[in-house]
Structures are given as structure tokens and as C-alpha cells.
Amino acid sequence: MVPKHEILPKEEVERVLEKYNITKGQIPKILESDPMVKKIKAKPGDVIKITRKSKTAGESIYYRVVVSD
Amino acid sequence: MFLEPDEVKKRIEKIREEIPRSVFSELEEELSKVEVTEEELNKIIEEIKRRYDYSLVEPGEAVGIVAAQSMGEPSTQMTMRTFHYAGVAELNVTLGLPRIIEIVDARRVPSTPTMTIYLKEDIAEDREKAKGIAKKIESVTVDDVIKRAEMDLIDSKVTLILDEYELKRREITLEEIVEKLTPIKGVEVEYNENQISLKVPNPSMKELRKVATRARGQYLRGIKDIQRVVMRKEGKEYVIYTEGSNLKEVLKIDGVDITRTKTNDILEIHKVLGVEAARNAIINEALDTLEEQGLMVDIRHLMLIADMMTVDGEVKAIGRHGVSGEKASVLARAAFEITVDHLLKAGIKGEVEELRGIVENVIVGRPVRLGTGMVELKMRRELEEKREEA
């Protein structure tokens, strides 16, 4: 039920932001207290890459930025 | 000249990132069955890219409204009946419209929390082991195994009359109960065959009542909040259904398959497994509810709703207290519910209306920024002037 979460390296973050022409604030959020965030030890400001299993696309990539709560 | 399989692989690898994974794997599979020439392969790739592009949602499409309609219409056909015995042995589960409302409202606790517990492969088919786990999970309190509790003010004691049938059924011994009751403060425990007496030091009705309530509520075993357990055989394996939900504790039990076990309490999933799992739960729960009613809603609409509910990292309701109530625009909020309050508060705070959304623009009578209204046209002055001169 829980998809794969991983911290996105800094260079990759830049690339993603550029690709979608957005700022970090526009990325969907994930709370610092989220069990998965704790598990991969991400800090606020980190961007997490989530590889979801999708019924329509097979697999899809989603990004969330860690925010403190 | 047909291309070598390796060459074909190399060529399609280039478009891996451009099309969805499912389309890609299908293409890969189909291509492994046939031989193609270079020209054919190029045509295939072109066509796939073109069709995929064509199937994408247009920029400016009102996906939210379409999703709302797609879920709203079938829900008018759903039964208003709250309870339904879902075929699962005498377990009560909320289904139909009330359940859908519960999901989108992100209620703190669903009206009928249930869990579906799957067991690890090696023990799933073993009836005795499954029974053992079921027993570990079901919570039993003293109240469940006694016939009645009597308060005796003269001897200042509380007497628990045990129900032998229940004791036998749940395989609990008298000693076990005594052991659990002994730690109660200032109480002397005496027992014989089928009753337990708790002597209270200072005799008062109030004190007796307190001890009686305390003793009856004492947990003997099992997991808190799980009131009832039903075991069912599905195919070859045994599955445990529960009334009441406590995901965190159940996942700790040895032999429980943590990857498949689920609960219908979405907020509990959020707490234990995180937002992403909660998003999946919203989609699955909504889809199951609709399907159970024989209604087909495209999963994409549910995905949009689930994504919307979880953008901020927590599970928010659709409606006044959630998504709609937190819109940035005053007019959009005022148009939804409690109009005067929103306008008044916005006035006091000095909020600015940017007129970016749909409702706001409808209210002030401007073109809505949707579809063809999304684009703004700019005129190049010099071109226009040149034309005039000519």
C-alpha cells in the first residue's frame, strides 16, 4: 500500500523544477512527521520522489516537498 | 531487412520516459513477438507518441468539475441504506452513499471501522494458526466473561459471577483473570470455583462502584479497540475480519501479512503509514464502494480527488472545513457556504481578491479562465501601426 519514497538529490530537484516550470512551494507537501519521511530520514525542504504504482499508467512519478508541521 | 531484437530494444528505450510505463511494457512485449523493419518501427513509435499525446487532457480542461460530476451523478443512484451485511459473516459495514460521504469528509473515525487482516503465506492456510492469531487480536475484557457483577455493601466487596460458557469458548482461565485483577489498588482478591470477590478497604457506595467499573473494564487480552473477530476462508487462505480497527498494534503481531492487511479508517492509515498510503486508501475505498453498488466511475476522477485531499501532506475533507474552505479567494469561499461570514472577515482583514479562479470571474461577469479562456492575447503595437500606414 505504501509506494517507494526516496530523497531526490539536489541537482535532480533543479531539473524537476525546470521541467515543470514551477517553484518548490508549488510542489505537493508531505509532513515532517509522516512515518515514511522519518523512515528515509528526510529533512524539511527536501524533495521526495515517490514512485507510485498506478492502475492507469503502470507506474508514475510524484514529488512531495517535506514541510515542518 | 528486419531489425535485430537488440536494435529494437535500443530504439524504443529512447521513448521510455515519454510514454507511460504500462504503454511502454505493452509495446515492448508486442515487439518481441514480431519482426519489424526500421521504417515500420519508426512508424509505430510515431503513432504511439501521437496517440498518447492525443489522449492527454487538454490544458485548461476543467478536470475538477468533470470529476465532481462523475462522482456526483452515480451517487444519486446509490442506496440510502446505511447498513449492509457485506456478505462477510455477520459483520456490519457502512456502504453506499453514507460511506462515500464519510470518505470525502475525512471523518476522524469511520462509523463502522473494520480491518481485513491477511496472514503470511506460510501460515495462511493453517486453520489452527489462523485461529491463534485471531484470538490474539480480539480484545476481551472482564465484562465479556462474567454473567454479572454484584456489589455487597455489608461485606464491602464486589463479586464477579463468571460465565463458564464464555470462559471455555475464549479459553480463559480463572487464574488469568485473578492475575489481571490483582494490581487494582487497595483491593483484596478472593476467588472460588466460579466467582471472584474483590474486597474494598473503605466501604462506601462510591468506592464500590469505582472498583466494579474498573474491574469490568479490565483487558484480559487482545488488542484495544478490536471488539469482534470473524475468520473466513477465501480460496485457500484464511482471512480475519474485525469490528473495530487498530492498525498499529495489528501490524506488530507476528504472522500478519503487513503488505496486504488493511483498515477502512483512512486517518489511521495516514498516521501509521503516511500520506501516500492514505491517498491509495482513499482511491481504493471509494472505488470499492462504488463498485459494490454496481457503478463504474473512472479511477482517474478518484485519483484527482484523492490527490486534492492529500496535497498538503494531511488528509483534508472536501468541503467547508477542507479544500473548499481553504481557497485563497474570498469570493470563491463566499460562493460556497456561509457567504456573509466570509465577506465580513475578508473586509476586516483587508483581503485582496485576485480574480483568478472560476467562481470569482463568474460573479464579477468576466470571461472565465478555463479552456479557451485560459489564453491571453497580446497585440504587437508596431505591427498594427504598420498595417494602418499601409
Image (cartoon, coloured by chain):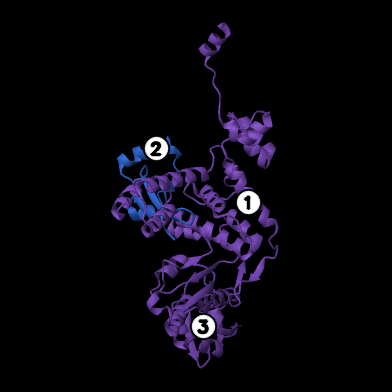
Chain colours: A blue, B purple
Q: Residue B237: image x %, image y %?
A: 46, 78
Q: Is residue B191 above or below residue B135?
A: below
Q: Are discs 2 and 1 both within one chain?
A: no
Report crowding for label 2: few under 14, some 14 to 19, many 20 or more residues within 10 A (C-alpha).
Answer: few
Q: Is residue B266 above or below residue A23?
A: below
Q: What's the residue type where badge 3 is placed?
A: Leu
To which residue does mark 1 refer?
Answer: B70
Q: Is residue B77 visible?
A: yes
Q: Disc 2 and disc 3: Cα gap in Å?
A: 72 Å
Q: Disc 2 and disc 1: Cα gap in Å?
A: 31 Å
Q: What's the residue type where badge 1 is placed?
A: Ser
Please state the chain letter of the residue tagged with numbered disc 2 in the rendered image: A
Q: Which mark is residue A19?
A: 2
Q: Is residue B386 above or below residue B267?
A: above
Q: Do the CB atoms of the residues marked 2 and 3 lie less than 8 Å apart?
A: no
Report crowding for label 3: few under 14, some 14 to 19, many 20 or more residues within 10 A (C-alpha).
Answer: many
The structure residue drawn at horizontal position 53% and vertical position 60%, both measured from the top left corner, is B284
Q: What's the residue type where badge 2 is placed?
A: Lys
Residue in the foreground of this view, choosing between B134 and B368:
B368
Q: Residue furthest front?
A: B1
To which residue does mark 3 refer?
Answer: B198
Q: Is residue B366 above or below residue B247?
A: above
Please state the chain letter of the residue tagged with numbered disc 1 in the rendered image: B
Which mark's residue is nearer the viewer, 1 or 3?
A: 1
Q: Residue B126: image x %, image y %?
A: 42, 83
Q: Which mark is residue B261?
A: none
The structure residue drawn at horizontal position 53% and vertical position 47%, both measured from the top left corner, is B308
Q: Residue B139: image x %, image y %?
A: 50, 76
Which mark's residue is nearer the viewer, 2 or 3?
A: 2
Q: Disc 1 and disc 3: Cα gap in Å?
A: 61 Å
Residue in the foreground of this view, choosing between B132 and B38:
B38
